[in-house]
Amino acid sequence: FRPLHKEEGPIQVNSSVRIQHVMNNHWLHGDNAESYSRKTQTWDTTERKQTNTSPHMRYADAFKVSLAEPDAISDHNFIAGATIFICDIIELIKALKETDDPEESLDTSVGDQALQLLHEIKTFMTESVAITLDRRKMLREMMLIDKMLELALTISESIQASNMDLSAIYEQVMIILYNYVTWKSDRNSEAVHLIQYLDFFISQLSHKNGVGFVVSRLLVELMKDRPQVIDSLTENHIDSFVSLARKSNSPRYLQLLGAVSVCENVARSANQSR
């Protein structure tokens, strides 16, 4: 950070500064004429401005320094570290899947570390109701939820292609996603974020080792009183729920049918007739 004027003393909180890259000495500029839109994560509707760098300093480019609370810094550091570790686990599982040895599996110590981290993430999501909203935003903004979804997809593919036993990790990942969906705030944001994975979740309903049970609960919460999710279901989706309910006496499949048959106290007659 550089003070806005050379004659200014130490940078103070809530003062304006310039930002200079420490490696190439370029200056960060805000392009007010152009908005930035993310190619993915359509759940986020916050308006952002495009930024770029230049070797030349512009007088008009100034950024405000704000003081972050210690708890927010601690939360940020935890999520940043967790996201990096999850990325490493994803790459490791992908690499193991590509080996010629069908018996190749995740190292026990790495697996234990992954389970410990997933436990810490679950605790992080549930330990304080007062700061839930801030933490939810961080989980989305810092891509941890996206990486958890990628980890779930990677594990699913690896289980089908090899003999790796990743069921314990897989179940914990699904529990975290379930906890994310059941957080009590703006329910629509989570629905829009996860709706693109409906086919994947539905395909995992019959999974063993507890995963299928967690996925069914996740889907019920994802669809409950969310018209945009119900409207995205196809006839094949509804038929798969009906088929599972007929094959099994488990009440979780009946709960799925209930979630798609009534939405916001309004009957969905087309779904009920199936």
Image (tube, rainbow, N blue to C red):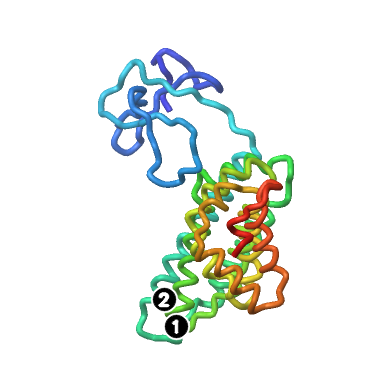
Residue 173 % position (x, y): 58, 64
| Number of numbered discs on residues | 2
- In this view, the residue in front, 248 or 60, is 248
In this rendering, would 31 be left or right of 206?
Answer: left
Q: Which mark is residue 56?
A: none
Q: Which mark is residue 96?
A: 2
- In this view, the residue in front, 271 or 254, is 271
**Could one spot residue 267 in this view of the protein?**
yes
**Callout 1 environment at 10 Å: few (<14), some (14 to 19), or many (20+)?**
some
**Callout 2 environment at 10 Å: few (<14), some (14 to 19), or many (20+)?**
some
Label 1 vs 2, first from the N-terminus = 2
Which residue is at a point 56% across and 43% down the rendered structure image?
Answer: 189
Residue 134 % position (x, y): 63, 40
Q: CA distance from mark 1 to mark 2?
A: 7 Å
* Residue 21, above or below 105: above
Q: Is the Cβ of the residue at disc 1 closer than 8 Å to that at disc 2?
A: yes
Task: Say what secondary structure mark 2 lies in.
Answer: helix
Which residue is at a point 50% across and 76% down the rendered structure image?
Answer: 106
- In this view, the residue in front, 129 or 196, is 196
Amino acid type at image mark 1: Glu
Image quadrant in which the C terminus is located: bottom right
* Residue 196, above or below 167: above
Residue 212 % position (x, y): 61, 71
Which residue is at a point 63% across and 60% down the rendered structure image?
Answer: 272
Q: Which residue is mark 1?
A: 104
Which residue is at a point 55% across and 55% down the rendered structure image?
Answer: 82
Occupied quadrant, residue 117: bottom right
Amino acid type at image mark 2: Leu
Seen as rendered, the residue at the extreme top is 7
Task: Say what secondary structure mark 1 lies in.
Answer: loop
